[in-house]
């Protein structure tokens, strides 16, 4: 039976009245609001925001909201009863209507500005004013900060209507993209990858918007039609939503001395970040320059580990700009992402993304974001030569730290104590040339097979075919590789069922998931959800939330499968042009 986890309170939260006392808006109270914002928060026009950390905004509720799903795991962690997700006042709040929330909850949310760097290059033209002052949360609005079971969380609606940063966009998210983000966040959490979390998902029964998307069976790279889709609001949860891009906005303003409080606003934001994301590792009483150096060091470690984890589970972020890079070192912004099925080193599901954000280029993209992060901090170290030199060293050391994380990760995936570069290189070659399914291959390998027969389940072409399909002699090379690998993991000659072999297998299965979020499972789930049938989505949610478990035969039969050939190169399945 499920235990209520709310240890402090000893009961599960079943309605907003019980939740309200946990609200604590320290961000709104300690950071600076935009001085030009209207007090009622209904100023939704695109405009320039010159200073302040956030704009108070009233979300625009979606019409006739209906419950789609919530995260039972997160609800349990927060001490919420599952019934809360379908209670009227909770649905109202998390579908964007704050007008009736009980005090001390507030009827205003907040949106933040951020800057954009793409692969380390600063951009300002992406906002309608060409200054960068109109860029930020265009459709993300935080609505609550609260402390549950001793942990502080910020809750943010995605698709909650226009903000001053909307750049003329409608501020909405469609059900399709909301389902993808909702499922992916909890799947990543279950995979053990740091991420923003999913709280809830509500769809409008009547409100729709038009978005470019693919017609059925389209092989076009770009969407070939405009489709009308239901709007939805998903709520995501994290200790903070501070992005590298947000630090950059304030860093750039400080660097250019754009207004008299620019440096102070940068410092406030950095201290807030430390408080929210790094309080366990950075002592509050230290002087700011020391804190800044420690922050860079801590973020470097988290970012490198995060990206190594992405690669471990086959995740490609797709659009790893600085504004999609959370300063807390977790995954944020599930837009044009995808999970690698056929192993391709440069897998990139987003057609607009380019190779620099492709699967195995993510460590290099992370390095660029880290460079942007360090540049944003630098104004705080003006006149502190020692700390500046330390920051430079930390920045320079990124590739080495990243490489060490990658080697650790590959070693774990392969059950090795130490990284073996030659064994790894040969494997990459075989995986690419065969080619294999990334998830199925590593999971099958985790069973420590006697020969390559079980591994063939992951092959996307049958090398056994008559007619010279194996002209490169790959099967022989696979067998040789397997023998070498077994030798390296120390089970060469160890019989089936030997203790060592069992141990290796168990450890490898803890890092090599069996189930992954294949887009062709997700497409029918969001299509049926658009027709009002949410059961397929909830079934998929259950499967993806236990990715390392064997699960039932039925689940295995349906979900542990190679991508069907007819879905290759299909728009919306294999690639997408945008995500909104
Ligand atoms: N429909 C929309 N209306 C207003 N702004 C939008 C809309 N879609 C995207 N934006 C804004 O455009 C920018 C780039 O979009 P991107 O796809 O990176 O983010 P996103 O998916 O909206 O959100 P996030 O990064 O918050 O997860 C963001 O600042 C985003 O807020
Ligand atoms: Mg984004």
Image: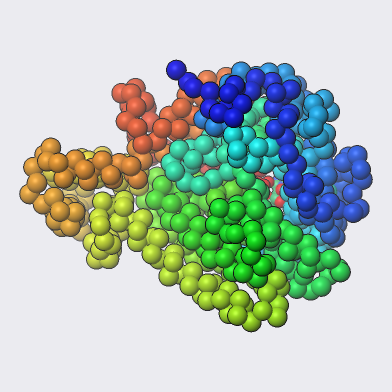
Is residue 311 rendered to the left or right of residue 72?
Answer: left
Q: Residue 135, percent across and down?
A: 76, 55
Residue 30, above or below 514: below
Looking at the picture, how far across and down is residue 358, in whole percent?
49, 58
Q: Residue at x 26, y 40 (%)?
A: 506
Which of the 4 quarters of the picture holds residue 67?
Answer: top right
Q: At 10% from the left edge and 52% from the top edge, which residue is drawn?
A: 492
Q: Residue at x 52, y 76 (%)?
A: 393
Q: Position of residue 399 (x, y in %)?
A: 46, 70
Inspect this view and state whether residue 101 appears.
Answer: yes
Q: In the rendered view, does 373 fall on the left or right side of 170?
A: left
Front position in the image: 568 or 232:
232
Q: Quadrant of the N terminus?
A: top left
Extreme residue in the front direction? 285
Asked whether residue 166 is in view, the answer is no
Near-viewer residue (542 or 214): 542
Q: Tell me where residue 53 sits by quadrant.
A: bottom right
In the image, what residue occupies the spot 40% across and 45% down?
Answer: 341
Quadrant showing the C terminus:
top right
Q: Is residue 476 above or below residue 9?
A: below
Question: Count the marks: how many?
Answer: 0
């Amino acid at each position: 039976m499920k235990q209520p986890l709310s240890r402090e309170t000893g009961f599960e939260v079943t309605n907003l009245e019980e939740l309200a006392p946990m609200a604590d808006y320290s961000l709104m109270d300690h950071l600076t609001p935009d001085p030009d914002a209207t007090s009622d928060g209904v100023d939704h026009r695109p405009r320039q925001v010159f200073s302040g950390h956030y704009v108070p905004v009233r979300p625009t509720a979606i019409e006739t909201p209906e419950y789609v799903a919530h995260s039972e795991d997160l609800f349990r962690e927060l001490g919420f009863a599952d019934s809360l997700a379908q209670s009227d006042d909770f649905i109202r709040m998390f579908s964007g209507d704050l007008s009736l929330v009980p005090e001390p909850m507030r009827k205003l949310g907040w949106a933040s500005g951020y800057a954009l760097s793409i692969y380390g290059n600063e951009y300002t033209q992406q906002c309608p004013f060409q200054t960068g002052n109109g860029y930020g949360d265009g459709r993300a609005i935080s609505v609550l900060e609260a402390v549950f079971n001793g942990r502080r969380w910020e809750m943010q609606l995605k698709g909650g209507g226009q903000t001053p940063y909307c750049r003329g966009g409608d501020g909405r998210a469609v059900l399709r993209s909301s389902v993808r983000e909702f499922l992916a966040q909890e799947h990543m959490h279950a995979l053990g990858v740091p991420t923003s979390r999913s709280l809830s998902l509500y769809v409008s029964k009547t409100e729709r918007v038009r978005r470019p998307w693919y017609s059925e069976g389209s092989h076009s790279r770009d969407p070939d039609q405009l489709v009308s889709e239901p709007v939805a609001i998903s709520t995501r949860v994290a200790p903070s939503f501070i992005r590298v891009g947000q630090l950059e906005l304030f860093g750039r303003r400080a660097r250019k001395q754009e207004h008299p409080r620019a440096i102070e606003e940068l410092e406030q934001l950095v201290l807030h970040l430390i408080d929210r994301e790094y309080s366990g590792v950075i002592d509050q009483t230290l002087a700011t320059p020391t804190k800044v150096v420690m922050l860079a060091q801590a973020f470097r470690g988290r970012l490198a580990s995060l990206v190594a984890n992405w690669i471990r589970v086959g995740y490609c972020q797709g659009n790893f700009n600085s504004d999609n890079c959370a300063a807390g070192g977790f995954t944020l912004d599930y837009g044009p992402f995808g999970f690698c099925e056929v192993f391709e080193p440069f897998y990139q599901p987003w057609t607009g993304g380019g190779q620099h954000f492709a699967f195995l280029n993510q460590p290099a993209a992370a390095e660029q974001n880290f460079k942007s992060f360090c540049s944003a901090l630098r104004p705080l170290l003006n006149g502190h030569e020692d700390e500046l030199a330390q920051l430079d060293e930390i920045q320079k050391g990124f590739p080495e730290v990243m490489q060490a994380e990658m080697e650790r990760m590959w070693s774990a995936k392969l059950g090795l104590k130490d990284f073996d570069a030659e064994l790894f290189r040969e494997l990459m070659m075989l995986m690419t040339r065969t080619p294999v399914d990334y998830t199925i291959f590593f999971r099958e390998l985790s069973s420590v097979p006697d020969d390559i027969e079980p591994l063939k389940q992951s092959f996307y072409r049958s090398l056994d075919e008559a007619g010279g399909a194996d002209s490169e002699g790959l099967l022989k090379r696979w067998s040789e590789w397997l023998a070498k690998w077994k030798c390296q993991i120390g089970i060469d000659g160890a019989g089936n069922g030997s203790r060592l072999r069992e141990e290796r297998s168990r450890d490898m299965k803890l890092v090599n998931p069996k189930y992954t979020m294949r887009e062709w499972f997700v497409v029918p789930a969001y299509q049926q959800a658009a027709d009002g049938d949410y059961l397929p989505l909830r079934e998929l949610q259950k499967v993806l939330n236990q990715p390392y478990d064997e699960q039932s035969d039925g689940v295995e039969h349906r979900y542990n499968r190679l991508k069907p050939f007819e879905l290759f190169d299909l728009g919306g399945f294999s690639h997408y042009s945008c995500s909104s």
